[in-house]
Amino acid sequence: MRAKSSLAAPNSIATTPSALYSNLIARMDRLPTSNPDFVMAIKHLVDRPLIKRALFRNYATIANDHPIPPFHPYFNPNIPHTTLDLDRAKWHLARSGLKGVRLPVYASPAAEGAVDMASILQEYGARVGLDLAVNRVPADGYWSTHWMRHPLTFGSTNPRPTADLAFSLFYKSDAAWNETGRKNPRFDQLLLAARGETDETRRKAMYGEMQSLVHGQCGSIIPVFINLIDGHDRRIGGYKPHPMGGLMGYQFAEHVWWDA
């Protein structure tokens, strides 16, 4: 028998907190998910610590139903965190009139963790009288066939370099990718004003209010922000984590060298 080589490559794992997330989308422009009490019931059925621990092995950061992560300079720390609360979920569900109504939710491997998140939500929903039917659909064609086309679907959003871009793409009233279909003139006004605001204190306050509006009124349920995980050989020089994407924001070949 040949002895195993002792010259195995010294591999390393790098993990970077990011603004990557998979979210449950409740359309606010169609029934039955346009009901505010139904949306609040769903939000209180999300076990965020469980999703972080079981689905992402703690390689994630707890989120609060808006797209700005805690490490972002414009993050608003004053928004109360929505937590798992079956009693509140049951109360809101009763007010919505949807207790016992069977609702389909479409999940796909195309959105990382979506299928498992849907199963967890289905289990907690059953405890309060919400009958969710999880429809697992293929990744192939998901974005054109199912995403935003049903009352309950999942999305997946890569990190964006600015808060303005994240809000403009997915939350502005007339955005093509306004996932929940929510239209809010106050939000649009703040978004436009923040672009031209040069006072950083006032600008941060504007983005803080936008986060509060999305958190409280929008049907985008974001449980966690997912860390970026890269495996690399320790003999590679110049490698640094980058929050905009794996392998240095997908540009590692421009910056690294072999340092054997």
Image (spheres, helix red, strand yellow):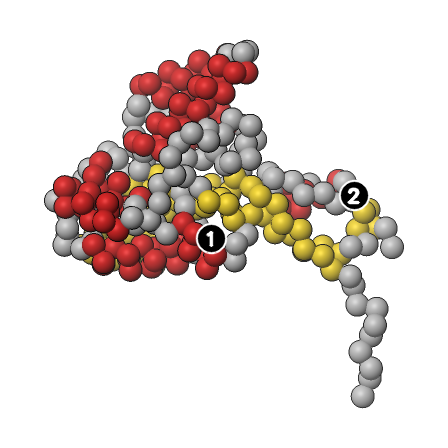
Q: Amino acid at mark 2?
A: Gly
Residue 187: % across, % down: 36, 21
Helix, strand or loop under label 1: helix
- Can the viewer see residue 175 in this picture? no
In the image, 26 versus 177, the foreground residue is 26
| Residue at far bottom of view | 1
Helix, strand or loop under label 2: loop
Q: Residue at x 82, y 74 (%)?
A: 5
- Left/right placement of residue 246 relative to residue 87 reads right
Residue 244: % across, % down: 59, 38
Quadrant of the frame with the C terminus:
bottom right
Residue holding disc 1: 52
- Left/right placement of residue 167 relative to residue 46 reads right
- Left/right placement of residue 111 relative to residue 103 reads right
Residue 179 lies in what quarter of the image?
top left
Residue holding disc 2: 238
In the image, 233 versus 68, the foreground residue is 68
Q: Residue at x 44, y 24 (%)?
A: 208
Q: Callout 1 environment at 10 Å: few (<14), some (14 to 19), or many (20+)?
A: many
Label pair 1/2, CB-CB below 8 angstroms: no
Q: From the viewer's perspective, is residue 260 above or below residue 96? A: below
Q: Between disc 1 and disc 2, whose residue precedes?
A: 1
| Residue at far right of view | 260
Q: Amino acid at mark 1?
A: Lys
Q: Residue at x 38, y 35 (%)?
A: 80
